Image (tube, rainbow, N blue to C red):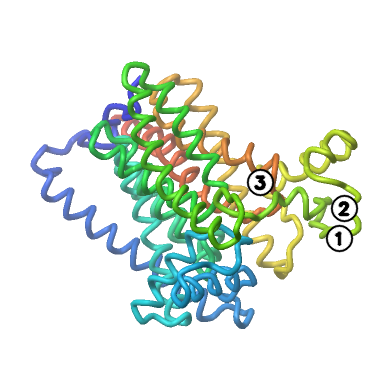
Amino acid sequence: MPVNPPASPDVRAAPGHSGAANSPLKTGSQVAWMLLAIGLVAFGLRVAVVTFHPQKGHWFHEDTIFYLENAQAILNAGLPTLNKAPLGFSYILAALLKLGFDLTTIAFVIQPLAGAIDCLLVFVLCSRFGQSRAGLLAAALCAVHPSLLNSSSQVLSEDWAMLFFLLGLIAASSHKKRLLFPAGLLLGFACAIRSPCLAMLLGLLVWLCWTDRAKGFRRVALVGLGAALPILAVSIHLGIASHSTVFLTLQSSEADTVKPVLGGFEALDPQTQRARGCYFEFAMSHPLQFAQERMVSFLTFASPWPFGDDRPLMRKWILCISDGVVLLASLLAAYALGRRRTQRGWFVLLWLPCCMCLFYTLFFSNPRYRVPTLPLLIGFSAMVFLPRVQRIGFKRQQIPGG
């Protein structure tokens, strides 16, 4: 089954319009100007959020310390000093610092720019599936989505993981053999930046096999080989620094370090953590409590309920409602597309967040992990609903006297 479906009604001329009015040159020019406007709005809003954020120093997250210290250690000694988080973002920070950018410039210019590029890549991804108009809508929604704005206002790794993953997914969705290995490199580096992206990488490999029975295994081999290189490079680098065997990060599962409770998360003191034992020991000795905790983790990912953090209530509810709209739209889009039994290639944009949700439910407890899936869900929903709305509009135009 091909990954790229045929072009949909959004690329056809509307009734009553001549082909000349929709010439490729004019259409291309209009799209370029709209993308420029979306990019400028996305960048401007992100700069405004980080500049005028009511919480002073919001851009310097506590996790920024790990990334920054590793970046400086890589520049000074060639090896990281902290292996609590994946190393990929530290490589990016090290490169930016080497180029002469200070941390303030990175926070107020480079990070918002990465977030704005993510929005434009959503358009490119939707266009791969024959839905350029839906891609414009999805890019515009990503440009103003509160969770994505908030993510771009902090020096964290989510925007960069999204950037590399979207680039890799765009390349992998092509049938051109020469793009598959570079796609794997990009996807592998996304995993080196945010280790939970491994779940989406594995999901993509399964998808390629399932949808292309003839050449699927060959495509998987090329993508997998490309992805293995940055993952192994980062793992070896961390292993040398820590004198141990490392796979991407030494960070233990959050299931070992925090206890999810309704309304928030509860950090475990060292004594309680030792009493619980390791992840699998606790699962075997306390199966009911383990299942309850994992269910709460599932709810923090798959529902918009504002589970606890230190954000003020108003901002928490803004993020909650905006994420909830995306999640609800995705469910409705999946139902609508399932009933039509067409354009099944689009389901990859829903399948990958589902893979992330499963991985998150088993091992993690922080709603921040949902952020990299939002552009995929927004693109999926826009591609399903926009052509249906357009067809309704065309039918109304055909009513006599309408």
- Residue depth check, mark 3 versus mark 1: number of the one nearer the observer: 1
Rounded to the nearest whole Å, what is the CA distance between mark 3 and mark 2? Answer: 27 Å
**Total label count?**
3
- Tell me which amino acid carries mark 3: Phe
- Tell me which amino acid carries mark 2: Arg
Residue at the farthest top position = 214
Q: Which residue is mark 3?
A: 301
The residue drawn where x is 68% and y is 63% is 316
Q: Which residue is mark 2?
A: 274
Q: Secondary structure at mark 1?
A: helix
Q: Secondary structure at mark 2?
A: helix
Rounded to the nearest whole Å, what is the CA distance between mark 3 and mark 1? Answer: 27 Å
Left or right: 237, with 343 as reference point: right
Q: Is residue 180 above or below residue 248?
A: above
Q: Which residue is mark 1?
A: 270
Foreground residue among 293 and 91: 91
